[in-house]
Image (cartoon, rainbow, N blue to C red):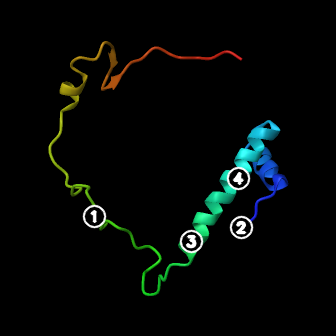
Amino acid sequence: MKVTTEDALHIAQLARLRFSPEELEVLRRQMESLLSHFSQVSELDTTGIPPTSGVLPLVNVMREDIARPSLTVEDVLRNAPDREGDCFRIPAILEEE
């Protein structure tokens, strides 16, 4: 696919990037090369391949969500530098505008 200098400039502006004329020409040629490679991929026969297929099988690696005993409130708050009842007490962080 042919990429014009105007196309490259438009994409650079969308990305909020500034290029010198020489850099813009390099970008234009690189985009043209990428699009050429993409067109080669579109020539592949993908008949019978589901759209979401991948190289690796997808497996859920998360453990079962099973309730089990945990720490007591006293154990959790034992090393707290400051507490108020069953809660951690922290200094107030207020920002002034």
Question: Which corner quadrant of the image does residue 71 belong to?
Answer: top left
Give the CA distance from mark 2 to mark 3: 11 Å
Residue at the (58%, 64%) spot, across then down: 37
Q: Find disc 1 in the rendering and name its residue.
A: 59
Q: Closer to us: mark 2 or mark 1?
A: 2
The three-letter code of the residue at mark 2 reads: Met
Give the CA distance from mark 2 to mark 1: 38 Å
Q: Earlier in the sequence, mark 4 or mark 1?
A: 4
Q: Mark 3: which secondary structure?
A: helix
* Picture coordinates of residue 52, whole percent (x, y): 44, 73
Give the CA distance from mark 3 to mark 4: 17 Å
In the image: residue 92, left or right of residue 27: left
Looking at the image, the residue that sits furthest to the right is: 6
Q: Find disc 4 in the rendering and name its residue.
A: 29
Residue at the (17%, 39%) spot, across then down: 70
Name above or below for residue 53 compared with residue 8. Answer: below
In the image: residue 28, left or right of residue 63: right
Q: How many marks?
A: 4
Give the CA distance from mark 2 to mark 4: 11 Å
Q: Find disc 3 in the rendering and name its residue.
A: 40
Q: Find disc 2 in the rendering and name its residue.
A: 1
The three-letter code of the residue at mark 3 reads: Gln
Q: Earlier in the sequence, mark 2 or mark 4?
A: 2
Give the CA distance from mark 1 to mark 3: 31 Å
